Every structure is written in C-alpha cells, then in structure tokens.
Image: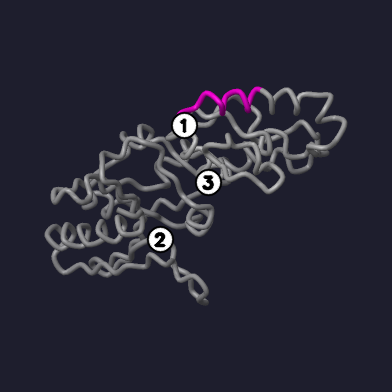
Amino acid sequence: MLPKDLELQAFDYLQVYLQERLPGCSLRPTMNKGRGTANPQLADAVLEHEGRTYHIEIKASSNKIDHNIRFTHQTVTKSIGKDLIVALISDVGTGSPSFEFFRLSDVVQSLRIEPRFLIAAKDTRSKRQPLEILLTLEDAALDVSNLLDSQVRNHVNIPVDPLWSPYIGGTDLDGYPYPPWLRYPNLPRTSMGWRMGAGEAYAEEFDSWLARQPTGVLQAYQAKYPAPLDWAEIWPRSEA
C-alpha cells in the first residue's frame, strides 16, 4: 500500500474511532495541508469537539510503530506556538488498527534535526495517553527555540569552518553513516583541501561501506539521502 493510501485509510479508521468515543465530534481531513492557498493547514486533520479545535498529525503504519517518527520542517515550524496532537495508528489494513496519542510539545526535548525533524518512537511512549485525556489538558504550545539554539543558532555567528557540519558525529538514528556531501558540505569535492585532507579519506570509507550493504539497505539509504548531481555516480552500479 502506498504511503498516501495508508494515510487515507488511517484517517477513516480514526474518524470511526473518535465518533465512538467522542459523540458529536467532527473530524475533517486537511492532508494536502492547504498547499498553494492563503490559509495553509497545520496538520492532517482538524477535530472539532465541545467548541474547541484540535490539530492532529497522523502517523500510520501497516505494522507496529517502533521506528523513528518523522515530521517535515513545515509541520514543525507551523506548529510553533500551537498544540499539536500526534495520532499513531498501527496495523492499518488488518481490520484491527490500534491507536495511541501524544502531544508534540510533550516530547520536544527528544526531537532531532536531520534532513527532517524526527523522534524515536521509544521516546514518546511515556507521554502517550488516551485522546480523551489529552483533550482535557491545558494548552501546551510547541516551543522549539531551545532545540534550535543548541543545534543550529549557536553556529550562525561563527565564521564558516569548511570542516564544520551539523552531521559531524557518528551515525544517524537509523545507524547509517552520513554521506560525504552532508559530512563536508562546505568543502568542494574538487578542492585541494578535499583531495589532501579528511574529505577524500571519508569518501573512501563511505564507498567501502556502500559496497558491503545488501540491496534493501542501499535502497532505503538512497531514498533517505538522495545524492546531488556531482555525487550521482557514487552508488554501486548494480543499485544505481
């Protein structure tokens, strides 16, 4: 099932789930986020209940959601100062989906910035509660200022070091090494600094890592980290 079809089916399940538990409520889809309109929507659905409006971001899976939960930059930035509820809908397509809910503002300390904002599913478990309880809590506006201060803004006023990168350490949360174009974004591949320094050595190690990966891992990696044009030839020929 395609991701968009999965999301649409999850919305249908969620609508039935809420109508059973919150009589009189109204749930309408906003999955296109209002792209191209003057009033873009915040998340995937809007819930109207007892005179209040709630925004719900749907994360759906045909299995149990135990992987990293990703959010686009648009979703997070539009949620700043607002109270966003995340609906985890597992086992979609089985006829017996399960539902769990948490507020993004309750887990913001575990949010990570990579190509997208993401959070490990395990870091949300202690904050998951029945939706009926979340709807009774006081508003908790999302505030990512501390997150941005620690991971981004502290580099803004520092002269650009060609060896600095936000992807400098270790591996990402999926255990993958960062690709060379992210690890050394300020060091041109054709420069003497690249050829004689850490860039070339890192690229050789990365190429060796790629050669050892099975097809499924390579496909997942290429989807996560699309290569820019000047790096397109790095993928093993059988997988390119």
Residue 49 shown left or right of residue 44 in the figure: left
Q: What stretch is highlighted in magenta?
A: 205-214
Q: Which amino acid does label 2 sit on?
A: Ala
Residue under numbered circle 3: 116
Residue under numbered circle 2: 43
Q: Residues within 10 Å of mark 1 (few under 14, many from 20)?
A: few
**Residue 209 location, quadrant:** top right
Q: According to the image, what is the colour scheme of the structure?
A: one colour
- The tally of labels here is 3
Q: Is the magenta stretch mostly helix, strand or loop?
A: helix
Q: Nearer the viewer, mark 3 or mark 2?
A: 3
Residue under numbered circle 1: 174
Q: Residue 119: x and y, percent?
A: 44, 39
Residue 7 shown left or right of residue 189 in the figure: left
Could you tell me which secondary element the residue under label 1 belongs to? loop
Camera-side residue of 56 and 193 = 193
Residue 139 shown left or right of residue 150 in the figure: left
